[in-house]
Image: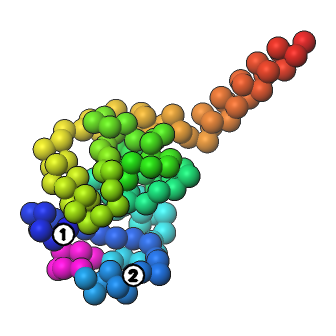
Amino acid sequence: HFNKVGRLPLKIFGEGRDRANLEALAGPTIEFLGWVDEAQRRALFARCRAFLFPGAEDFGITPLEAMAAGRPVLAYAAGGALETVIEGVTGRFFRQQTAAAIAAAVAASRGDIYEPLTIRRHAEGFRREVFLERMHAAIGAMLEDQR
């Protein structure tokens, strides 16, 4: 299905048990990169039009890494993506984990306009320092309430 969406290139990084099967199904515009280090990931995010996140994870750090690079995320509407992706602002959701649903989301997103600075600022709200600051404030407020 992906190869039918305007023959767009797709770079897949990471390893998984289905890689061999997926490679056998992939057309000429799909490239499997395997494991990539952090510098390679940053370079891929810097050059991509969008990041495709088809899985359901409790949190999912890679969508935030893509958003930190100012790139929109096309994500399966489940798990942590529901907390990190803002529909129409930092990306778009698809509701089924099927090739057809993903291809439809990619095709629909081609007309979307995203503001990279807005996406980056949103991702900054999930930085470790921000999390720790909020956690300390919440704990401080709880301790203050105990007095």
Assign the magenta stretch its main secondary structure: loop
For this rendering, which residue is in front, 146 or 100? 100
* Amino acid at the residue labelled 2: Arg
SS for callout 1: loop
Residue ID for mark 1: 1
Q: Nearer the viewer, residue 81 or 112?
A: 81
Which residues are drawn in magenta?
A: 26-31
Residue 127, position as x, y percentages in the image? 56, 40
- Locate residue 90: give its quadrant: top left
Would residue 29 be counted in the magenta stretch? yes
Task: From the viewer's side, name the closer residue of 76 and 46.
Answer: 76
Residue behind mark 2: 19
**Location of residue 20 in the rendering, given as x and y in whole percent from the top left corner:** 37, 87
Residue at horizontal 28 percent and vertical 87 percent from the top: 24
- Give the image location of residue 82, x and y in percent: 44, 42
Q: Earlier in the sequence, mark 2 or mark 1?
A: 1
